[in-house]
Amino acid sequence: MANMETPARSVDPLVVGDFVDMFVPVVEFTVEYASKQISNNGVEIKPAEAAQKPRVHIKGSPYSNNLYTLVMADPDAPSPSEPTLREWLHWIVTDIPEGAMPLKVVEYMGPKPPAGIHRYVFTLFRQKEAEQVPHKPPQGRSNFKTRQFASDNGLGLPVAGCTLLQFTKGACCPSLALYNVCLSCCYI
């Protein structure tokens, strides 16, 4: 069993509320796009930097039997002001052992925000057993429901989560006040 100490970082409103219930992180994990590492919320990534699927690292013992499911979704699709396609599913990976190669359920689709500021949320769930999550993709990517997916597959609350942010031209960071995030302005 993995170390169950709570990581130092706290739950951030960027990963709860819209589509997952409040949770306390109990696993440390990182998502790496080339030279950028995402281990907390609000990291800015340009679409070109996120075109290829990231590397995911779950901290733990190499001798652990723990398996995980990772969901990546965009709660702001197609635009933050009218998220009619909430959540847009970007990736599902299941049976991720601590420190080994996972099994893909949904192929990776890199972020390409059409308008405004988009949050891309990585939510990590601990599985109770191997192949707990069926290895068949959902019907489509639009209107995916992370909370319902977790419930349908008996995954319970997330054990970790992190968020990356992307901006389209004309979207300025001050509107991130909606998400209680303070970043400098940047444009893609």
Image: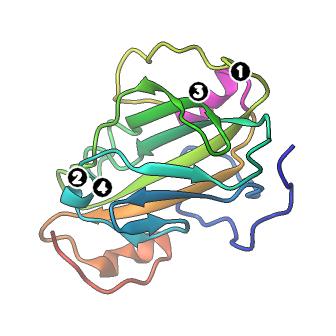
Quarter holding residue 184:
bottom left
Q: Are the residues at dot 2 and dot 4 in contact (C-beta closer than 8 Å)?
A: no
Return the x and y of residue 7 as percentages of the image width and height.
Answer: 75, 67
| Residue type pointed to by label 1 | Ala
C-alpha distance separating marks 4 and 1: 39 Å
| Residue type pointed to by label 4 | Ser
Magenta stretch: dominant secondary structure? helix
* Residue 153 shown in magenta: yes
Q: Nearer the viewer, mark 2 or mark 4?
A: 2
**114, above or below 177, in the image:** above
**Quadrant occupied by the N terminus:** top right
Residue under label 3: 149
| Residue type pointed to by label 2 | Pro
C-alpha distance separating marks 3 and 1: 17 Å
Ranked by sequence position, the earlier of labels 2 and 4 is: 4
- Mark 4 Cα within 10 Å, few/some/many (few <14, many 20+)? few
Residue under label 2: 113
On the question of residue 33 being in view, the answer is: yes
**Figure coloring:** rainbow
Ranked by sequence position, the earlier of labels 4 and 1 is: 4
Element class at badge 2: loop
- Mark 2 Cα within 10 Å, few/some/many (few <14, many 20+)? many
First to last magenta residue range: 145-155
The disc label shown at residue 130, or none: 1
Element class at badge 1: loop
C-alpha distance separating marks 1 and 2: 34 Å
Residue under label 4: 81
Ranked by sequence position, the earlier of labels 3 and 1 is: 1
